[in-house]
Amino acid sequence: MHQLLLVGGLGLAVVIAATVFSRRTGIAAPLLLVALGIAAASTPWVPDIEVEPELVLTGVLPPLLYSSSLRLPVIDLRRNLGMITWLSVVIVIVSAFAVGAAVHLCFPQIPFPLAVALGAVVSPTDAVAATSIGKRLGLPNRLMTVLEGESLVNDASALVLLRVSLAALAGSFSLGQAVLDFAVAVVGAVVVGLAVAWVTILVRQRLADPVLTTLISFAVPFLAFAPAEAIGASGVLAVVVAGIVTGHVGPRRFPARDRQAQAIHWATISFALESGVFLLMGLELPTLLEAARDESTLGSVLAIAAVALLVTIVVRVIGVFAPVLVERRVQPERTERVRARLAELENRLDAYQEAYEPQSDEAERRLTHFERRLARGTADVEFQESHPITRRGGVVLAWSGMRGVVTLAAAQTIPIDTEHRATLVLVAFVVALVTLVGFGGSLPWLIRRLDFPEVTPDQRRDEFTALMRTMLTDASAQLGPLDKMTVDGQPIDSQVVQRVNEQFVPVLLGRLRGDVQPRPGVREQLVIIQRRYVDALREALNDERSIGAYRSETYAAAQAILDREEQRLDPQR
């Protein structure tokens, strides 16, 4: 026990040291950790380490995916859903069968179903290294969303395909059954993920203790994963669905204190798990070499890995640039059609509003909902025009095809009695290692060379100010004139009006710091009015977020301002 604690402590120390070194040198931390793991495993003092694949797939992968999906904005996911689905489902399937065909053709001793299983193992990408580099070097937000969204979904596609190919290897393959299994895996995962997300959201809403709500959030990925796997669905996809729903609904349902506690705890857990699995990936190399030694030579392992690697690279390059080039050709015409349709709908709406008045609250709500959908459609068109995936972006997406620990863990789930198992596990490791070191190591140079335009501080400030002004306008319309408000039936003091106009609003706009205390007689009124404004502003922010006229980081900045104000006004809330 003491030895285990010592190893764990040393592992954390190595992770921290590698991260600090990474930030100072610009080398991606995952690459450093893999290299340190290999170096440590080569010494006589470190014993051979073999991690159970089920531990990674059921104990590490769910919280990692849940943490990432919590942070993925739904508006960005929706706008890039086509590209994400293409890369994470279609390209994964095509890549798996292409690798299977090539490996079986070049090495006939490997059965085709087993070769497809290898293809399924090496097809999913791991965006940890790419996104850590991209964030540091200012990669455009749309490319970051595609990379993160792809890595969240492609694990599910690959694991389902791996399950089907292993069934075919055992002689129980049926095309109809395979299609049915895939449909059940997807639909079942979505249903389970939605159910777990909403049940835990409702439970957390009723609890006033941030410790308990955070503890429940730790259980969510496992509550989604286990039932989904039990019914034959994709546990990985169920976790992703639960995380996306929770992250999207959280600002409406949970107080700022709970969300900030959750964000800090999940960031810590995610960092520790991500770093730990890359370190373990390097430490496992001697064990994998020893296991494969009796089956094949190192030369044959490298030859199979070279074929698999070449095919995955070619498929990814074609898979990325095909939709990019098609979109560049058809996007202008499609945009014009959508703009014309939106203009027609807007004219109809204007004519209706001039001729009729809503006769009920329900009619008013429907009208507001229709107006919001029009605004969202306009924002979507403007987004597609102003943030296209260019050829430079396509180069980065194609280059960001690194494989990670899921590839290694998935390979180790191949049954023990399968012929060539140890060889294929080592092949998967070689593919993951080469892509991490080769593509991950050169990605910073590539991004700098492509010279993507940066968002300037002035642009960020102007966009943030525009969003806050829109929110303030909506909040004021909802609350009514400030000097007409009442507290407990009594008119508010004139100093409250002055205080809100001269201090509270400028603070929200980020143009004023400091806090001047009002006289004691009006302090309670001021807090009540400010709370009303914060609640109204939060509703306005949620409405604006659903439209998507601004970048995700601008919404996050506005959310942070409101969270700080909420905690300042009511620390116990």
Image (cartoon, helix red, strand yellow):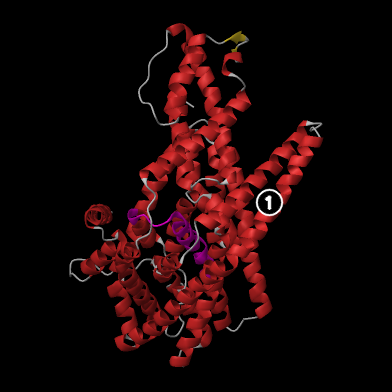
Instruction: Locate residue 404, reporting x and y percent.
Output: 39, 67
* Residue 141 seen in render: yes
In depth, the one of 144 and 121 nearer the eye is 144
The part of the image, by quadrant, that contains residue 174 is bottom right
Assess disc 1: are there few (<14), some (14-19) or many (≥20) residues with their C-alpha within 10 Å of its C-alpha. some
Residue at 51% across, 38% down = 467
Q: Secondary structure at mark 1?
A: helix
Q: Position of residue 40 (x, y in %)?
A: 21, 66
Q: Amino acid at mark 1?
A: Leu
Spot occupied by residue 45 in the image (x, y as percentages of width and height): 18, 66
Does 258 sit left or right of 16 as displayed? right
Tell me where residue 389 appears, x and y as whole percent. 48, 63
Q: If the image is split into quadrants, where does the N terminus sit?
A: bottom left
Where 252 falls versus 315 (above or below)? above
Confirm whether residue 414 shows in the render. Answer: no
Q: Which residues are magenta?
A: 136-159
Is residue 144 inside the magenta stretch?
Answer: yes
Which secondary structure type mostly characterizes the magenta part of the structure? helix
Kindly identify the residue that appears in the image at 62 percent across and 57 percent down.
Answer: 190
The correct choice, above or below, for 154 with respect to 16 in the image is below
Q: Residue drawn at (55%, 50%), measured in percent from left and top?
A: 74
Q: Name the foreground residue: 273 vs 508.
A: 508
Q: Nearer the viewer, residue 563 or 393?
A: 393
Quarter location, residue 474: top right
Q: Residue 42, located in which quarter of the rendered image?
A: bottom left
Query: Which residue is under mark 1?
Result: 342
Q: Is residue 191 magenta?
A: no
Q: Residue at the top extreme?
A: 521
Q: How many marks?
A: 1
Q: Is residue 311 left or right of residue 343?
A: left
| Up-down relation of residue 207 to residue 90 (above or below) | above
